[in-house]
Amino acid sequence: MKILLIEDDSHTAAYVADGLRGQGHEVDHSATGLDGLSLASGGGYHVMVIDRMLPGVDGLTIVKKIRAAGIRAPVLLLTTLGGINDRVEGLEAGADDYLTKPFAFVELLARVNALARRLPLAEEETLLRVGDLELNRLERTVTRAGESIELQPQEFRLLEYLMRNSGQVVTRTMLLQNVWDFHFDPHTTVVETHISRLRAKIDRDFDEELIHTVRGSGYSLGLSR
């Protein structure tokens, strides 16, 4: 699931983003209202988590503007304002749910998952297919030739990224940035280790390999030509 997080507090942002990524979700983060509004206006998110008090453009304004633009993605507002009038104001602005700070991550995750179920996604957004391999982004399931494959959250994120870029070469740097959110090289074998584990689950018991090593470049996922 692709989630937009607009939160200016760095500790809260890291807490939420790391937790969501740990569950296998793709998270874009903005620390300012103006940048957040720009990202939100572009659409393409399954759920948006927006802090109410933001520098530049506040959370209520962001919600009002994206609703006026016809963007229907569910919105969870985060706020320190817990009064009834504050909650009503947020919901009337177009938010779908309201969570008061401080909060437990498990509650936020439950609310995000509940919001995601409210708005059915088009099949092309929900399902990724390469040959007989199918990944359901909403149900978070993977099958090959109709056979269920159990993946850990990080393995799921890795496979989703490879499938979204099927037929293309993805480099180790691209994987570190987009799957692990590393914007530097930590000099570990994390990519190689996870590729190996994923191959064992996706390719080992099937006639055709889908995950290919492109020597000197990176990896690609697709049917052999």
Image (cartoon, rainbow, N blue to C red):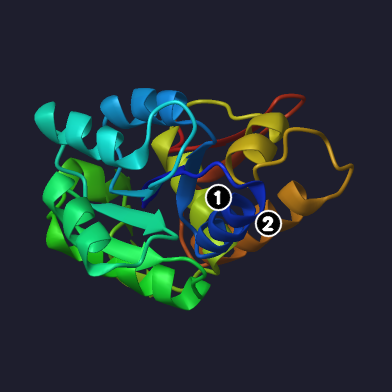
Residue 150 in the image: x percent, y percent?
A: 47, 73
Residue 207 in the image: x percent, y percent?
A: 46, 57
Name the residue located 32 percent from the left edge and 69 percent from the top edge: 111
Residue 221 in the image: x percent, y percent?
A: 50, 39
At mark 1, the secondary structure is helix
Name the residue located 44 percent from the left edge and 38 percent from the top edge: 222
Q: Classify 181 as above or below 13.
A: above
Identify which residue, 45 or 57, lies in the foreground: 57
Q: Is residue 204 visible?
A: no
Q: Amino acid at mark 1?
A: Leu
Identify which residue, 216 or 70, lies in the foreground: 70
At mark 2, the secondary structure is helix
Mark 1 sits on what residue?
Answer: 158
CA neighbours of label 2 inside 10 A, class few (<14), some (14 to 19), many (20+) = some
The reply to whether callout 1 and callout 2 are in contact (CB within 8 Å) is: yes
Q: Classify 84 as above or below 211.
A: below
Q: Amino acid at mark 2?
A: His
Q: Is residue 120 left or right of residue 19?
A: left
The image quadrant where one finds the C terminus is: top left
